[in-house]
Amino acid sequence: MTTTLQPQRMLKATTPAAAPRSTRKKKDKGRGYETRSLMSPLSLQSRRGKLMYWTVLVVVVTGFTLAFVFPLYWMVTGALKSPDELAQIPPSFFPKSFDFGVYADAWNQLQLGVFLKNTVLYAGGAWLFTLAVDVTAAYALSKLRPFFGKVILALMLATLMIPPMVLLLPTYLVAKDVPIFHFDLLNTPWAIWLPAAANGFFIFLLKRFFDSIPRELLEAAEIDGASPLRILWSIVLPVSRPILGVVSILSVVTVWKDFVWPLLVLPETDKMSISVGIASLSAQMPQNVLIASLVIASLPTILVFFVFQRSIMAGLTAGSLKG
Amino acid sequence: MAHLTAKPPVRRSLPQGAARRAVGRNLTAYGFLCGALICFAFFSWYPMVREVVLSFQENNFVDPAKWVGFDNFRTVIEDPAFRAAWLNTAAFSGLALVVGYAIPFVLAVVLNELRHARGYLRFVVYLPVMLPPAVGVLLFKWFYDPGAGLFNQILDGFGIPPLSWLDSSSTALISLVLVSTWMNLGTGTLIYLAALQSIPGELYESAELDGAGLFRRVRHVTIPQTKLILLVMLMLQVVATMQVFIEPYLLTGGGPENATVTVAYLMYQYAFNFGDFGAGGALGLMLMVVLMVFSTIYLRVARDNEGGR
């Protein structure tokens, strides 16, 4: 269903952020002479047009800030308020005192250190495991093309059509008692790592990118006697950096944000991920300590977003083109 | 087909060595594939089969499982929460569409016109998506607090009497929709924005020359040009919102009076609170059938999309 995409489009879809942005920049400098969108540049030049434009801009910037940044501001400052100040009506806009001790309380009382360490272990392991498993599989399907390769690919992509929630119970039962081997994966990192690698979307993204690598490049290496593993390592991987970046970030962020699966397979308090840990201990905590722990839990993902914004958005639009 | 470009080199290989090379290539390929095959087999393919089997069995995981036919389905359907769960799930999905489907598109259209603060606006709208969902939901739980919660304080500021949000069966579900929309708005907005940027400017130009005003340009240029992505997002959103679990799990526990119990949450309760995996499996199978209908429409839309290019 997805193999009909053309290679040229594939490349575009994996690095979409760069192309539109460069035209945008040109456009900004020329105040909208190159390409136009809904509003004509001419109508924006007039006095009335300019007034309208600036009004809309101010409204949108204020609205977005109130809707998306203010709740986070309220969270960060809420943690600094004492329980009395939190219950006060009307609320104080700035906290009366900046007592960062509450963050230390949250860290100690909620064993956030343990939860964070666990989550790093789960997300990091899932990342390495996903890359190792999915890159080799996508390479085999794209370049070695074994018998039944198309069937296998179709079966892997078909899993994208099954909503994950409806397979929650049977997958849990597998993790509890793996068929044939009879391992109990509950409360072990494997319960996170193994299912994380079974991701049809990553296989799809990687295979689509590998398909677009010119065959001549690989053939030259083959003639020189390089083994398939060597070709993968020395030729395919270095040119695939953009897509590897997208898949890496998506896999880490997905595992980091996941809630339901770790809730089921990691029930022991010492093994919980940070989301599950905070949620399960939230009822026993004073309000301000709980809020402080929310701040700590959201910092890593926001930092990741800050640094890898471009790759994350590229992955998002690549996802929208999947079909 | 992408494969076409890759075919000739294989045919070119010498006849006598071809068979051996094909075997070798296959062995290597399956060596590379085995990790993925194991992961998919155990955690994707087998669970699909298990899901169907599970829903027709009575299973306490000590004695051998017993086939019970449609008993599990009967148990589930006779549960008074069954009707509530489906109605709530449909209402949640519907409300999420009303609130969360048009807004991202409108935001994207406006954002696409702005020449300033683009990076900031795009960053900010996606910020809630990056929060772990549990954090977003717990944050809103505090905002919904009927006493000193942020939302009632804001209402108070405008002189509006406070609402009981999660504690009243009339407002609980819409409260869940609000959190969910706030957390997921950014995805749709950025996807639409990318789609809008590929609309050729000449189309707007000629529409304007023909005398089309702002709204007619949106209706006759913007919407037709983004129709496919709009349809695809509609299907994806329905499938995503019908699996709602974390909001009722963390905010309301299905209450008050089953006002927020959803299908996925009921399924979880059957399995992990009542220990009845068979009934949970039956409910999951029903949800799967309903969602597969939407997935199939999505697939068809996506396929038409590709055929058209």
Image (spheres, grey):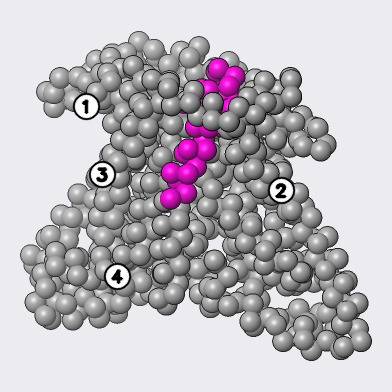
Q: Amino acid at mark 2?
A: Ala
Expressed as whole percent of the image width and height from the top left, the position of residue A64 reads 29, 46
Q: CA distance from mark 2 to mark 1?
A: 52 Å
Tell me the element at label 1: helix
Q: Amino acid at mark 3?
A: Val
Q: Above or below — where is A257 with respect to A108?
A: below
Tell me the element at label 4. Answer: helix
Residue type indicated by callout 4: Gln
Q: Chain of mark 4?
A: B
Instruction: Single out the mark in the foreground, 3 or 2.
Output: 2
The numbered mark, 3 or 1, whose residue comes first in the sequence reads 3
- Label 3, label 1: how many angstroms apart (C-alpha)? 23 Å
Give the residue type that dot 1 points to: Ile
| Residue B129 position in % (x across, y down) | 43, 44
SS type, badge 3: helix
Which label belongs to residue B41?
2
Given this view, does label 4 or label 2 mark the residue nearer the observer? 2
Q: Earlier in the sequence, mark 4 or mark 2?
A: 2
